[in-house]
Image (spheres, rainbow, N blue to C red):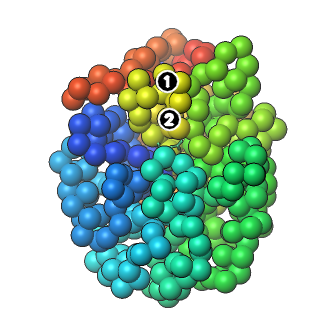
Amino acid sequence: MESLTIRRPDDWHLHLRDDDMLRAVAPESRDFRRAIIMPNLVPPVVTGAEAAAYRDRVIAAGFAEPLMTLYLTEGTDPADVVAAHAAGIVTAVKLYPAGATTNSASGVRDIEAVRPVLAAMEEARVPLCLHGEVTDREVDIFDREARFLDRVLTPLRAAHPGLKLTLEHVTTTEAVDWVRANPGVGATITVQHLMANRNDMLAGGMRPHFYCLPILKRATHQESLRAAATSGDGPFFLGTDSAPHPTHAKESACCSAGCFTAPHALPLLAHIFEEEGALDRLEAFTSLNGPAHYRLPVNDDTLTLEKGAARTFPERIEAHGQSVTLFDPGHPVHWHVR
Ligand code: NCD
Ligand code: ZN
């Protein structure tokens, strides 16, 4: 049997939610050692004290090494951010443009309002993760990421050249090019954006489990993402953006944004990297580039993937009264985690 052993992966962008949903999904990230945990709870995780309490709930739910984030609001206290980072409670701060995605209403409307926080983070070397989409209603949803690069990210980088940036879940050729042109900036890429494009979501029927934000783009963008991820190059690393929503909220007249990929992310990635003839660069994407970007050690254990008969993944997980449907690529996958 063909097999591939890599250093234990980390997930640099993960949603675990809270309460019963947290208890249902936390064990599903078992293939990963560490994960950056997104703060877009209701209400959001804003202060260092809230992040410390959430971290304890995540660990109690069964995910042992969470790396916590703070949700940047226009009321965020710079001193609290710096203290929480210095104390090791918080790894990064997340900027959501208000209204960009699930639970982003408390996000940033006016970048000037958070200027003191950004300056303090730059000074204290606290990384900033960005949801890179403008939210203006007149901007087409397929153009919102590209517009963000020019309107927000380029001026932000110029104003804060020392601020460590991670552009989350990049989905376009423009974003890949921007990251390559800006050394030191990292970019996470999801499984679904490598696996699928908007035809997979919309042609021959509308598939709610493919709907996430930023929305899947056309195939040419998918190809750019595949090239970036399989290049092995330092700026690009895995952030699954696994974002569980109850099955009834996905299979709905107004479907929630988010794909649930934590349980089977690694078999899906092995499939993609094999298609691209790049299995030897999977480890860089899942296990090496992220730690290098965040200046953390790589994991000291390994994970082995095996190729054999096609496996079917469970259609959904049901636990703690929750039902969450897995992202189904719609074709057989021959890889599994040993
Ligand atoms: C995420 C969620 O559900 O919290 N949804 C998504 O489509 N990716 C939020 C996010 O990361 O944008
Ligand atoms: Zn996300």
Residue type, mark 2 in image = Ser
Identity of the residue drawn at 48% across and 27% down: 250
Can you name the residue that lies furthest to the right here?
220
**Relative horizontal placement of residue 319, taking residue 255 as reference (left or right):** left
Can you name the residue that lies furthest to the left here?
60
The C terminus: image quadrant: top left
What secondary structure is marked by label 2?
A: loop
Q: Are marks 1 and 2 in contact (CB under 8 Å)?
A: yes
Q: Position of residue 98 (x, y in %)?
A: 54, 59
Q: Is residue 5 visible?
A: no
Q: Position of residue 298 (x, y in %)?
A: 43, 58
| Count of picture labels | 2
Q: Give the spatial CA distance, label 1 vs label 2.
A: 8 Å
Q: Position of residue 163 (x, y in %)?
A: 57, 78
Q: Position of residue 266 (x, y in %)?
A: 49, 34
Q: Is residue 103 visible?
A: yes
Q: Is residue 306 above or below residue 217?
A: above
Identity of the residue drawn at 48% across and 56% down: 105
10 Å crowding of disc 1: few (<14), some (14-19), many (20+): few
**Mark seen at residue 256:** 2
The answer to which image quadrant residue 275 occupies is top right
**Mark seen at residue 252:** 1
**Relative horizontal placement of residue 88, taking residue 7 as reference (left or right):** left
Is the shortest distance between ligand 1 and the CB of mark 2 under 8 Å?
yes
